[in-house]
Amino acid sequence: MPGCPRGLPPATQGSSGAGGMCAAVPFVFLFLFLLLLLLPRLWRRGAVPLEPPGRAVLITGCDSGFGHFLALRLHRLGFTVFAGCLCPGGDGAQRLQREAGGSGRLHVLQLDVTSARDVLAAKELVLSHLPARGFWGLVNNAGISTFGETGWLPMEKYERVADVNLLGSIRTTLEFLPLLRKYKGRIVFMSSINAYFTLGNGIYSMTKAAIEKFCDALRLEMKKFGVQVCVIQPGNYARFTKIQPPLSAEEIWNELSEEEKTVYNKEYVQERANFFNSILSEGSTKGNEVVDAMVDALMSPAPKARYMVAKLKEKALVFVCALFPTVVMDSVLSYALSKVKLGTIQ
């Protein structure tokens, strides 16, 4: 037999030679895969727990929602918290101050992430009140959303949503990056499972997909400085955050251009509004698990690159979108949208 050493029976070669080695390859890969899964847990056990006292964290978008509750949670843990609010005199900011008491470790500040002046002022405030262990974390939480098919929305709305959700996060990150590198801190970004698909809020999905890619580049670049970058990907928490209030068909119709009104009629707009509002009504009213993920991203010795906090059916949709051909995902979403009476278009 070609390739077999002389005097050695073929059966002996097959049982202990290349064939046996090939059979062992899957087990080696399985062992390495399991080892990779276990390494973060082993590292967490052996690592020294983070001590929050003396460390500062800045959070954007603390008027309500995740940012508001994260500020209170971190304050209770012992961090010095800088809670950026769009309306520092509003109800949300006042509640933060009341619930924090007189500890002096929670600072409510004016912070519109679309304003370079506000971001610079926030940095100056942080520097003037920096605790002993320095600046530990930046949480880019501020965000807004809107509903509408692509042609329904004016360019001004695209610019506004992108300026808050995408450029606002980048603007704040760039300003605080020197401090984060100096203290080897953490950067946490609020994304969404809508980064993978969209159902009536393409403008919001667009900004979240873009921030994911920004984080992918930043995460790799910051490793050499000891700075860790994490992304939080919540599912539908619209009822908790109130980021997107329900919309009436009349309100949508009144904002359409005359050209769009020649293509669509009020019945179609009503169906689309009903469909989107039904999605909003299914949103969770409890955001504790998302805040838990944000805290883990800031405090864990081995934080995850991404924390997906969503229902099983939402994770399944993301799985289909990420692993299957686009035509499959299009079919799934088209089926969901088929509940809308497309036949009412003029």
Image (tube, rainbow, N blue to C red):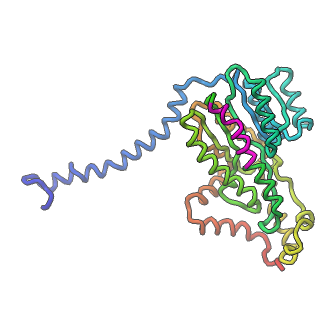
Q: Is residue 162 above or below residue 153?
A: above
Task: Point out residue 114 in the picture as x, y percentages from the top left corner.
Answer: 80, 46
* Residue 174 part of the magenta segment: yes
Query: Residue at the left extreme?
Result: 7
Residue 142 relative to residue 21: left or right: right
Residue appearing at x 63%, y 46% in the figure: 215
Is 4 in front, or is 20?
4
Q: Is residue 9 above or below residue 309?
A: below
Task: Point out residue 309 in the picture as x, y percentages from the top left corner.
Answer: 67, 45
Q: Which residues lie in the magenta part?
A: 167-181
Residue 15 relative to residue 224: left or right: left
Res. 106 in view: yes
Residue appearing at x 65%, y 51% in the figure: 312
**Quadrant of residue 301 within the rendered picture:** top right
**Quadrant of residue 31 within the rendered picture:** top left
* Count of marks overlaid on the render: 0
Task: Point out residue 202 in the picture as x, y percentages from the top left corner.
Answer: 74, 61
In the rendered view of the protein, which quadrant contains the C terminus? bottom right
Query: Residue at the bottom extreme?
Result: 346
Is 99 in front, or is 225?
225
Residue appearing at x 69%, y 37% in the figure: 294
**Quadrant of residue 64 within the rendered picture:** top right
In the rendered view of the protein, which quadrant contains the N terminus? bottom left
User: Chief secondary structure of the magenta span?
Assistant: helix
